[in-house]
Image (cartoon, coloured by chain):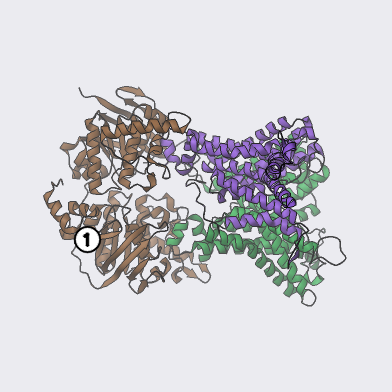
């Protein structure tokens, strides 16, 4: 049976209804898993919603997670538009964090905050881009499969960071593999602090100003991809390499540019986690966020607005999942990882599975007339 | 001199043990990719197979039952991948990645729910595993220098699945190049339209390829959990599925070449483990993380094509649509 | 007694909202050669796909030798004795001829047995029908004419008594076409029924006994070939009177603006594609490159356009000089007044998923006219696209519509508009009317001549000899990567050019052509 679109569905169905159906299918599948392990899916959903948005602290945590997913989601989508599948977000975020850590540790002794923070952000971007550079170069100039190389680089990054944090970068006397705490000047203010400046009190949560940077990135990414000529070249390469060459574009250079920008965006996870919350460089701070970015990008149809919405959903799931692991210990937090896989499956590979049914219902609703033409 | 021979033999012995999951997965990937279906999901299928084998072995105490279930589980995931790629013409890479992530999460959720050990399965007794087999005459042979020792150390003493893995390579070569199925398999990866117009079902052919892939990855997973080790631990595949894929690409999708690449990886791993704690001139002690990262670095180096460029089956990754 | 080989009754087939076949009926006499003509999108390929089991008809019946059959897949068709030679060959390039023919008709699960059986059967077929191909050669290495013979052998091997050929001569020289027609006549003599799908009216007149005309998904007429002519067929295909020749003023060429000097090019696999090419094009003239596809014309175009680097020699286009050390690129070409309409419009000329206005700036997206600061000036892009659509009658004139949703002809007009409205000094055009319906062909040809009259130098590459002869002021013939000869349009005729396209030098070709019988 062909899934090729036979009629043109209105945009709101293509962009709204079908993605929603995909998420629903993923959630139902996850619900089945919960049933299998002997728990009640509906109760689980209740606990999750309550934990995510039922109280102030939950909302704060949800948005804090959302920030990370916006960064990795933008990263994956930037690469997707150039026709590349960047699975290396984990490693790029991790290595980007190293860049942030190095800048801060070097400067926080004497430089003021308004200098350290932008420089640290730049360091995150640079290091994140750098970690994406080699796989990008190998794909562009030697045809090496970028999916495999970026996954390999994830593993390599993990090994490298353990080596550094358990070794040279460790704070003397501390048993944990992490650096010393950053100086106050390098702290990105928490949202509850920001609100306090205006006299408003909100609950203490890890949510911090990096959310604003994430939203700024959304706007910048949108403008870049759809409104600039470099974005035009990027999209052209993603659609057809041969047409790109015809148009005077160099596909290898675009591959490099796209991946480096992608890596840079992933590197901003550290802005949230390190500058905003942990205030030190530590192991596994980016764990899982890179892969979530894939689910977010696919769910959000690689568009910043969709990515923000999808990030919110996954923020809900993460926070709800943490609450769930607390209240229903049989369902561990890895349930969210499994759900991610389901989302990627239904929004990515099986994205148009529901199309024939939707078409049929749509036609019935419209009176069942089929346009005739030659 | 005797010690050196023993060292070499022990290293080669370790090579085989480490290479076995890679061999199973590389052969698995060969069937799938030759038919035109990209399979990034070797990792996930192997992990799922490992979990299934360990869980069933822990619950029933039967290694054979565990093996059978592992194969079934991997095959189901393979069919899911096939369903997404063949029937729904979804993106092969996205589907593979989805399955990998799904399995990574699901194995821990189920493992924790059923065994309450944080995702691990309980340690297995010897009778629930595939234990090393001493081939006949190995005790006597071990006294004969070099050849006898090779027989005793290197060839004998492996568990059943290692031998199966080694046998799968010539079997695959025979199937792919000497049978009707193999001819059609290779054809459908190059030009599915030619196969379709010859009256052969492209879909059924690809599903069969994908199912064989499932069987072999199930064997790989079972090997990890109930032969090489004594149970399942989280993320125990550690990227070997991807490494096997790299070996396949490096071996230009040919059985014996891919087998060779798997052996190279196995050898490197076996050698590097012996390097732990050893001091190299000028560098000092090699950090343990560098050794851990070696297989991944080697994968990248191999894929960088410094040793020849690989040409994939022409129709790989392209969903087959009858053209109007 | 006239026996009917195939009868189609009221076949209808819709793809979503598009009615590809509507109540099509057809009767094909056994042992005849029956032609089916129609424009692109007329429904002839769909009809044959139904006959071969690729699709199932929504309604209607198929009768083979008088008995109704149900054809749901290729196997049913093959069992009914129907074989098909597709326009794009269904061959597995790395396999040998033997393996290709055998595929799907192996005699057992092990190959060794099948190979032996297939070899002896094929040798018998070759003797019986006079179709000779080297059985153990890799198909991908064979010349196109031989590949087509492998396709025919495949069908005969499966016992085809009814052979369908879909646009078989697009890739053949006129001489190879003659050879094919000899084979078809021999097959006809053996009682094989042949259905020939083509849009080449000349060939219909040359070889068929009956011809059926399709238009807009419907069967509009049947004619015995002897009782009709090209003009009538063209009119039936389009639904109105069609000019088959172009009125154009004589050229007034000025200085040479494009000069190719000892150009050589070898591709990535080490195959020499261009061998010592020398020619020039002047402002105000159209030079047409004639030749069967695959003889270096595509590479020539791409070297000129900056997509491929020259191997040896130089190429001068206006102010640009390209050599192996300094090949330039398409961006540089465009900046210097050289425009390129690519042969493969769907894969190179536009981006299917982009809107028309985004495709309309492909290659020109760095032009200051389209930019405002770091951003693209959407308003300027849209205005330009609207102008292009008006001037070149692109329908529907909607810049926001996705490029893939335009018909082939309209896509081509948009691409031509994009390249021509930049008023290039040099215009490189490849296959300008491939897959374009007759009405649009007239329009496109007139636009190309208009460019010439405005002073541009036009280099035209086309596999349609009629098009080259009708548009060009001078014709250059290529074969095997070399220029065989140059002929002023006034002196050129199809026979002579056809011979040159096989490598025979001009003078010899002229003599041979003069001697041969010339059907119109």
Chain painted purple: B
Residue B20 in view here: yes
Q: Position of residue C235 (x, y in %)?
A: 22, 44
Q: Quadrant of residue C323?
A: bottom left
Locate residue C253 relative to residue A55 in the image: left or right.
left
Residue at figure coordinates x 27%, y 52% from the top left: C464
Q: Nearer the viewer, residue C48 or C238?
A: C48
On screen, residue C149 above or below B261: above
Q: Residue C318 appears at what percent x and percent y?
A: 33, 72
| Residue A136, percent from left and from top | 58, 60
Residue at the far front: name it.
B144
Identified at 59% across, 41% down, the residue is B27
Count of numbered tags: 1
Tell me, by letter, which chain the rendering colours brown. C
Q: Chain of mark 1?
A: C
User: Would residue A264 be visible to someone looking at this image?
Assistant: no
Q: Horizontal placement of A93 versus B257: left or right?
A: right
Q: Which is nearer the eye, A368 or C36?
A: C36
Check disc 1: other Cα within 10 Å, few if <14, some if 14-19, many if 20+.
some
* Disc 1 target residue: C485
Farthest residue toward the bottom? A110
The percent coordinates of residue C448 (x first, y second) are: 28, 61
Judge left or right: residue A347 versus residue C86: right
Q: Is residue B75 above or below residue A193?
A: above
**Chain that is coloured green in the picture:** A
Picture quarter containing residue C348?
Answer: bottom left
The quarter of the picture where the C terminus of chain B appears is top left
For residue B59, above or below residue A75:
above
Instruction: Say what secondary structure mark 1 lies in.
Output: strand
């Amino acid at each position: 049976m062909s899934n090729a679109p036979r009629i043109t569905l209105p945009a709101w169905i293509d962009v709204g209804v079908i993605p929603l159906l995909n998420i629903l299918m993923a959630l139902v599948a996850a619900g089945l898993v919960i049933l299998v392990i002997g728990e009640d899916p509906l109760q689980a959903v209740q606990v999750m919603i309550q934990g995510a948005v039922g109280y102030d602290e939950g909302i704060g945590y949800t948005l804090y997670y959302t920030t990370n997913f916006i960064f990795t989601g933008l990263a994956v989508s930037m690469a997707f538009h150039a026709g590349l599948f960047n699975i290396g977000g984990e490693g790029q975020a991790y290595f980007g964090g190293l860049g942030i850590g190095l800048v801060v540790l070097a400067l926080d002794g004497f430089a003021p905050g308004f200098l350290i923070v932008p420089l640290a952000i730049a360091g995150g971007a640079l290091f994140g881009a750098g970690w994406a550079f080699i796989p990008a170069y190998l794909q562009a100039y030697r045809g090496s499969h970028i999916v495999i190389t970026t996954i390999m680089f994830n593993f390599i990054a993990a090994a490298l960071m353990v080596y550094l944090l358990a070794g040279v970068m460790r704070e003397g006397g501390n048993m944990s593999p992490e650096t010393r705490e950053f100086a106050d000047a390098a702290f990105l203010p928490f949202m509850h602090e920001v609100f306090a400046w205006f006299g408003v009190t909100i609950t203490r949560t890890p949510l911090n100003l990096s959310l604003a940077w994430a939203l700024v990135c959304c706007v910048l990414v949108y403008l870049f991809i759809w409104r600039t000529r470099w974005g035009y070249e990027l999209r052209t390469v993603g659609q057809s390499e041969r047409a790109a060459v015809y148009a005077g574009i160099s596909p290898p250079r675009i591959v490099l540019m796209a991946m480096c920008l992608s890596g840079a965006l992933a590197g901003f996870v550290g802005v949230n986690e390190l500058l905003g919350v942990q205030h030190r460089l530590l192991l596994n701070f980016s764990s899982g966020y890179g892969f979530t970015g894939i689910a977010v990008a696919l769910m959000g149809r690689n568009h910043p607005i969709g990515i923000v919405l999808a990030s919110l959903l996954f923020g809900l799931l993460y926070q709800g999942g943490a609450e769930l692991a607390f209240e229903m210990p049989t369902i561990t937090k890895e349930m969210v990882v499994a759900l991610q896989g389901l989302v990627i499956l239904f929004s990515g590979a099986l994205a148009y599975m529901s199309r024939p049914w939707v078409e049929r219902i749509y036609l019935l609703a419209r009176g069942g007339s089929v346009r005739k033409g030659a | 001199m005797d010690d050196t021979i023993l060292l070499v033999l022990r290293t080669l012995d370790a090579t085989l043990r480490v290479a076995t999951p890679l061999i199973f997965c590389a052969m698995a990937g060969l069937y799938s990719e030759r038919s035109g279906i990209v399979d990034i999901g070797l990792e996930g299928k192997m992990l799922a197979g490992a979990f299934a084998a360990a869980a069933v072995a822990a619950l029933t105490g039967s290694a054979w039952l565990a093996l059978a279930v592992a194969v079934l589980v991997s095959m189901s995931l393979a069919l899911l991948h096939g369903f997404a790629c063949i029937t729904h013409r979804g993106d092969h890479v996205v589907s593979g990645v989805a399955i990998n992530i799904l399995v990574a999460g699901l194995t821990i959720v189920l493992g924790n729910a059923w065994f309450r050990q944080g995702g691990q399965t309980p340690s297995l007794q010897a009778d629930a595993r595939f234990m090393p087999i001493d081939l006949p005459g190995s005790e006597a042979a071990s006294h004969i220098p070099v050849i006898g020792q090779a027989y005793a150390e290197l060839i004998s003493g492996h568990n059943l699945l290692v031998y199966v893995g080694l046998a799968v390579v010539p079997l695959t070569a025979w199937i792919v190049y000497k049978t009707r199925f193999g001819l059609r398999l290779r054809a459908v990866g190059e030009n599915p339209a030619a196969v379709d117009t010859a009256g052969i079902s492209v879909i059924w052919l690809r599903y069969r390829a994908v199912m064989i892939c499932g069987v072999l990855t199930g064997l790989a997973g079972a090997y990890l959990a109930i032969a090489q080790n004594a149970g399942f631990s989280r993320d125990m595949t550690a990227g070997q599925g991807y490494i096997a894929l790299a070996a396949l690409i490096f071996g230009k999708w040919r059985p014996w070449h891919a087998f060779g690449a798997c052996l190279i990886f196995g050898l490197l791993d076996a050698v590097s483990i012996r390097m732990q704690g050893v001091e190299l001139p000028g560098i000092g002690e090699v950090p343990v993380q560098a050794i851990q990262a070696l297989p991944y670095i080697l994968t990248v180096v191999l894929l960088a094509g410094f040793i020849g460029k690989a040409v994939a089956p022409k129709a790989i990754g392209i969903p087959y649509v009858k053209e109007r | 007694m006239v026996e009917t080989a195939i009868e189609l009754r009221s076949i209808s087939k819709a793809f979503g909202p598009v009615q590809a076949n509507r109540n099509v009926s057809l009767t094909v006499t056994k042992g005849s050669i029956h032609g089916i003509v129609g424009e692109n999108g007329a429904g002839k390929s769909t009809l044959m796909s139904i006959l071969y089991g690729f699709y199932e008809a929504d309604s209607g019946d198929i009768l083979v030798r008088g008995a109704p059959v149900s054809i749901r897949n290729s196997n049913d068709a093959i069992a009914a004795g129907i074989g098909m030679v597709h326009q794009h060959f269904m061959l597995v390039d790395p396999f040998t001829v033997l393996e290709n023919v055998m595929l799907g008709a192996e005699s057992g699960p092990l190959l060794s047995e099948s190979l032996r059986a297939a070899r002896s059967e094929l040798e018998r077929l070759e003797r019986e029908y006079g179709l000779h191909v080297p059985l153990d050669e890799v198909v991908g290495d064979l010349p196109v004419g031989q590949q087509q013979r492998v396709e025919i052998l495949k069908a005969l091997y499966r016992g085809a008594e009814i052979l369908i050929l879909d646009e078989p001569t697009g890739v053949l020289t006129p001489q190879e076409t003659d050879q094919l027609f000899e084979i078809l006549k021999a097959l006809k003599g053996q009682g094989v029924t042949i259905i020939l799908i083509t849009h080449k009216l000349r060939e219909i007149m040359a070889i068929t006994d009956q011809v059926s005309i399709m238009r807009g998904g419907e069967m509009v007429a049947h004619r015995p070939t002897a009782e009709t002519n090209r003009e009538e067929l063209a009119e039936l295909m389009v639904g109105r009177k069609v000019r088959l020749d172009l009125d154009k003023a004589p050229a007034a060429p000025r200085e040479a603006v494009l000069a190719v000097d000892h150009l050589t090019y070898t591709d990535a696999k080490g195959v020499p594609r261009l061998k010592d090419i020398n020619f020039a094009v002047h402002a105000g003239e159209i030079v047409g490159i004639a030749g069967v596809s695959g003889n270096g014309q595509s590479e020539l175009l791409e070297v000129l356009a900056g997509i491929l680097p020259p191997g040896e020699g130089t190429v001068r286009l206006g102010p640009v000089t390209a050599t192996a050390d300094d090949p330039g690129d398409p961006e540089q070409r465009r900046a210097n007044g050289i425009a390129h309409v690519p042969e493969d419009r769907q894969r190179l000329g536009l981006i299917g998923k982009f809107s028309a206005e985004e495709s309309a700036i492909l290659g020109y997206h760095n032009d200051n006219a389209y930019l405002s600061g770091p951003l693209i000036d959407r308003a300027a892009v849209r205005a330009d696209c609207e102008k292009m659509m008006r001037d070149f009658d692109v329908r529907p004139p909607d810049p926001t519509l996705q490029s893939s949703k335009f018909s082939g002809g309209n896509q081509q007009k948009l691409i031509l508009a994009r390249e021509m409205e930049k008023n290039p000094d040099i215009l490189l055009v490849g296959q300008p009317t491939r897959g374009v319906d007759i009405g649009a062909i007239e329009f496109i040809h007139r636009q190309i001549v208009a460019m010439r009259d405005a002073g541009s130098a036009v280099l035209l590459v086309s596999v349609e000899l009629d098009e080259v002869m009708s548009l060009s002021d001078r014709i250059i013939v290529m074969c095997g990567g070399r220029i065989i000869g140059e002929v002023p349009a006034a002196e050129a005729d199809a026979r002579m050019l056809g011979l040159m396209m096989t490598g025979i030098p001009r003078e010899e070709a002229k003599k041979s052509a003069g001697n041969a019988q010339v059907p119109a």
